[in-house]
Image (cartoon, helix red, strand yellow):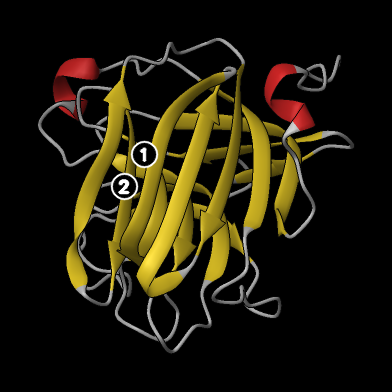
Amino acid sequence: MDHCFQPGEDMAKFEIRPTPRDRAEKDGPNKRRSELHCTKNRLPNGTPLWGAMSFNHHRWSDPTGMARGWGGVHGQIHMGKFGGSPAVAFRRTREGRFLVTTRGEFDDRNNKRWTGPVSFDEVHNLVYRVLLHPAEGALDVWLDGRHVVNVAGASIGSHRGGSYWCIGCYYSGGISCPVVAEVANHIFPSSKDLSARIAAPPPWPVA
């Protein structure tokens, strides 16, 4: 499936396409995934981590069909050693709105931290700072220069640590049309301060 991941020099393209439901599928019924993840570089607890990316999510050709699904994830900090749900996730709802959620050991649900309209077929810039901690976690998110999430003293991740970053497309409830996401200017979560990028993101690569 050559369409799933197309790397370029300065950007990458992820795509998932609908196929007939297959309950024998290893990943579960009708799940669709095209992701990169890094399990070798596990993210530490108790250390502020900065990450960033520019993205362009292409418009869905069947929004009515997609609205019957669950929506999906385009970037997540996965709790690798505690359950399967993400400590932090950047999502598209089934209506196509952008959604940021957190989850933790002492608050084991996907907490909606911000949701709003984020246009398709346009470049957007995301910067985030996260502190993974089972009880005193924190998350700040800036989207196109606007501070949309400011959470502190929350359960984000688990005491076991070992979380890791994933990027791409993951729609666990299936899809009714192709989902395409382009990503550029990606910065893996680290302790390097990226605050300067909030107001001055790098340009989108020119083909």
Left or right of 91, for residue 174: left
Q: Which badge, 1 or 2, is on the more N-terminal residue?
A: 1
The kind of residue tagged 2 is: Thr
Return the residue nearer the eye: 47 or 119.
Answer: 47
Q: Residues within 10 Å of mark 2 (few under 14, many from 20)?
A: many
The kind of residue tagged 1 is: Arg
Residue 89 percent coordinates (x, y): 40, 50
Q: Quadrant of the C terminus?
A: top right
Return the residue nearer the eye: 52 or 152.
Answer: 152
Rendered position, 178 above or below 144: below
Res 137 → quadrant: bottom left
Question: Residue 174: in sight, yes or no?
Answer: no
Question: Residue 190: in sight, yes or no?
Answer: yes
Give the label on residue 91, or none.
1
Element under disc 1: strand
The residue depicted at 78 percent of the width and 29 percent of the height is 196
Rendered position, 22 above or below 65: below
Element under disc 2: strand
Left or right of 114, for residue 137: right
The residue depicted at 29 percent of the width and 40 percent of the height is 113
Q: Residues within 10 Å of mark 1 (few under 14, many from 20)?
A: many
Cβ–Cβ under 8 Å for marks 1 and 2: yes
Residue 120 percent coordinates (x, y): 45, 13
Residue 62 percent coordinates (x, y): 26, 17
Rendered position, 35 above or below 204: below
Left or right of 191, for residue 124: left
The residue depicted at 54 percent of the width and 31 percent of the height is 181
Give the label on residue 101, or none.
2
